[in-house]
Every structure is written in C-alpha cells, then in structure tokens.
Amino acid sequence: MNASIFAQLVVLGMIWGASFMFQRITVPVIGAGMTGAGRMIFAALTLFGVLLLLRKPLQWRARWRDYLPIGIIVMGLPLTCFAVAARSLPAGYLAVLNATVPLFAVLIGWARGTRPSTSKLVGVVVGVLGVATLAKFGQLAMTWQTVLGFAAALFASFLYAIGAIMAKKRYGDADPLVVTAGNLIGGSIPLIPLAAATAPAVLPSEGVIAALVALGILCTGVAYALYFRILRAAGVERTVTVTFLVPVFALIWAALFLREPITWAAIAGCALVLFAVALIFERVPGFARTPAPLPVKEELCEE
C-alpha cells in the first residue's frame, strides 16, 4: 500500500468517524427522523452533482425498481436507525456497533448455506464479546433507552449486511458510484414526508445546521465518492481496512469535541470488535486461510 492510498484511507476513517459525533449534535435538537432524512437528502444531492460533473447517467428509468427498495434498506433505514441510537449512545459506541456489519455478513452467509472458515467463526464470537463488553461494563446504565439504542444500531448493521447481498445480486458489475447515488436518491424519497413531519418548529442554531450539512455532504456524499476512488485504485481488500480506523477516530473526535470519556470498557469493546473484524477478513496470523497450492503441470520430456 503506497503512501497516497494510506493517506486517503486515514482521511476516510476520519470523516466517517466524525459522522457519529455530528449525529450526537443534531439528534437531540432536530430529532432522529430529521437527522436521517436530512443526511440522505444532502448526500443524494452531493453524489448527483458528482455524476453531473463526471457526465455519468443515473440510469433512473432502468433501475428505479432497484434504487427504491435497496436505497431504503441499504441507506434510509440504517441511517435513521443510527440516528435513533444516537439519542442514548455515545459516538464511540455507535462506531463500534457499526463495525459489526462483517459479523452479520458471516452469519447471513452461513444461514444461506455458505459455511464460514474457522477464522470467521471465531471472529463472530469475539465480536459478540466486544458488544457485550460495551453493554455490560460501559459507563451507561442499561435503561430501556440504551437498550433501544443498542438494538437500533445492531439492526442498522444487520440491514447493511442484507443490503450488500441484495446490491451484489441486483447490480452485478454496475458502476458503484452510480449505484450509490441511485440508492441515496431512492432511499431519500420515502424519507421526505418523515423530514417534513418531524421538522422542528423553531429554526435550530447555526451549529446544528452546519452539523447536519456536514453529516450529509461530507460524511456521506463526499465520503462515498472518496471510498469508490480508493476502491478503484487499491482494490477491495485494502479498502475495507478503513473499518479498523472509523471507531478509533470516532472515539477521538467525541472525546475532543463532545467531552465524551474514553473508558477502559470502551477501549476493550472497541479492541475486541476490531479484532473480530480482522479475524473475519482473515488477516490474523495463525487464523488466515492458507491459499491452495497451484497445480503443477507435468512436462513431457522427449527421449
């Protein structure tokens, strides 16, 4: 991995890590519905603008039947669920729970008949221990609000995993940037009435509006554009390592700007979940799958 790709991955981790901090700013003031819908709408407009600059067609007529359901499952519902979770959970917790997406992907694949490797099975167990550590030993009391927050964040991660399977099946080799823009637009449409119904009666402060705009344009629209840039240059295996960076930066930003304490339980839970992700990606020595040797072709020797 060259220095340029590494620097872009760090920037992407910083941006996505900040998204959980921004939600902690917007949700208490304008609510979860407005936060999720506003984020989607700003992000959709951003990526639509990117497509116009790149002169790439959205292919709405051909794909709207895919954009609407997948956009809701992959984007609309998960982002709204995380906004609901942001009512009661610190930003660092949200980022750690977001990192459980690969765990759900393994479990869903297993349910569909694909037996996971030993490394991935161990990763699922370690990931569950990491979430349990956050819930049991964190600084939060287990009230119904915090339980709802955990449930909403985990359900959002589950939807991300489901959506990835649906997108792979329906989109095939389609341009990922076009597909993401279409999903954002498709997922935004049903959220517009929610945004109108939950809009605050009083105009929020400039700081809250700025956080919502940053959440949509920077942390979703620009972040996805950067993600696909890295994906094209570095490939899938290197790009997914951003998963390890997001919770770390989320904890740092929340501590610096929101004064959220970094507890030992948060560090331990984060470490366990990140170790689980490494196991699922088969990047841990001793657990990584050994590639099968290539067949040796027998050479015919003339006597």
Image: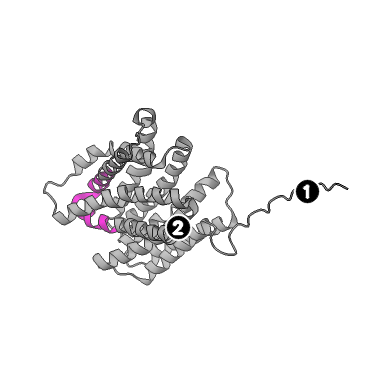
In this view, the mark in front (2 or 1): 1
In the rendered image, residue 232, in percent from the top left (x then y), is placed at 44, 48
Residue found at the far front of this picture: 303
Mark with earlier residue (2, 1): 2
Magenta stretch prevailing secondary structure = helix
Q: Is residue 293 magenta?
A: no
Q: Residue at x 68, y 51 (%)?
A: 294
Q: Count the marks: how many?
A: 2
Residues 133 and 202: in front is: 202
**Quadrant in the picture for residue 195:** top left
The kind of secondary structure element at disc 2 is: loop
Q: Position of residue 226 (x, y in %)?
A: 36, 51
Q: Amino acid at mark 2?
A: Thr
Residue marked by disc 1: 298
Seen from the viewer's position, the closer of residues 106 and 183 is: 183
What span is colored magenta in the figure?
Answer: 21-40
**Residue 109, above or below 145:** above
Which residue carries the number 2 mark? Answer: 241
- Locate residue 123 relative to residue 229 in the image: left or right: right
Mark 1 nearby-residue class (10 Å; few <14, some 14–19, many ≥20): few
Residue at 41% in and 64% down: 270
Pick the front one: 246 or 259: 246
Q: Position of residue 91 (x, y in %)?
A: 31, 60
